[in-house]
Amino acid sequence: MLALSVLAGVGCMSGSQAFTTQTVASSEVEGGAWFEQSGCTACHSVSAYRIVNPAALAPDLSLAVENVPRRFGVPLEQFLRAPTGTMAMVLSSRIPMTDEQRTLAIDRLKEAHRRHQESAGAVRPVAGH
């Protein structure tokens, strides 16, 4: 079982709040529970799983597949392997991940995006049209 040691507080909480360490069974935890246990929801909402962060300090991770290229000019995979801005700090010190764990995070983000599209009624174009 792969374990991912993370800090649930990440960088979004005030300096007076202590960070708590959690261990996530990353390859076995599914859906919204993975985002919660990995610490992502300390700052982010994940609407595809009906997870709402009332502080709304960071973008909805259900849209990361679309938002990352628009905001950072690189695909999600490239961004998570070499993040910039706040996520550079978070992923280097607060939620450090192995390459395998980053690959899992990418898969989870893509799954959240797929679920978001389905719930929004997004339709894929038919081949040949």
Image (cartoon, rainbow, N blue to C red):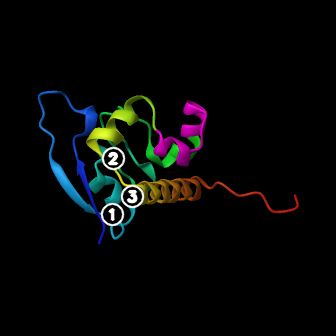
Q: Residue furthest right?
A: 128
Q: Is residue 70 magenta?
A: yes
Q: Main secondary structure of the magenta part?
A: helix
Which residue carries the number 1 mark? Answer: 26
Mark toward the viewer: 2 or 1: 1
Report the disc number at residue 101.
Answer: 3
Q: Quadrant of the N terminus?
A: bottom left
Disc 2 crowd, CA 10 A, few/some/many (<14, 14-19, 20+): many
Report the disc number at residue 40.
Answer: 2
Q: Is residue 11 left or right of residue 83?
A: left
Q: Quadrant of residue 104 in the image?
A: bottom left
Sequence-wise, the earlier of marks 3 and 1 is: 1
Helix, strand or loop for disc 2: helix
From mark 3 to mark 1, how far is it between C-alphas? 7 Å
Sequence-wise, the earlier of marks 2 and 3 is: 2
Whether the residues at callouts 3 and 1 have beta carbons within 8 Å, the answer is yes
Q: Which residue: 59% across, 38% down?
A: 74
Amino acid carrying label 3: it is Gln
Q: Which residues are magenta?
A: 67-82
Helix, strand or loop for disc 1: loop
Mark toward the viewer: 3 or 1: 3
From mark 2 to mark 1, how far is it between C-alphas? 13 Å
Image location of residue 39, percent across then percent down = 28, 48
Image location of residue 36, percent across then percent down = 29, 53
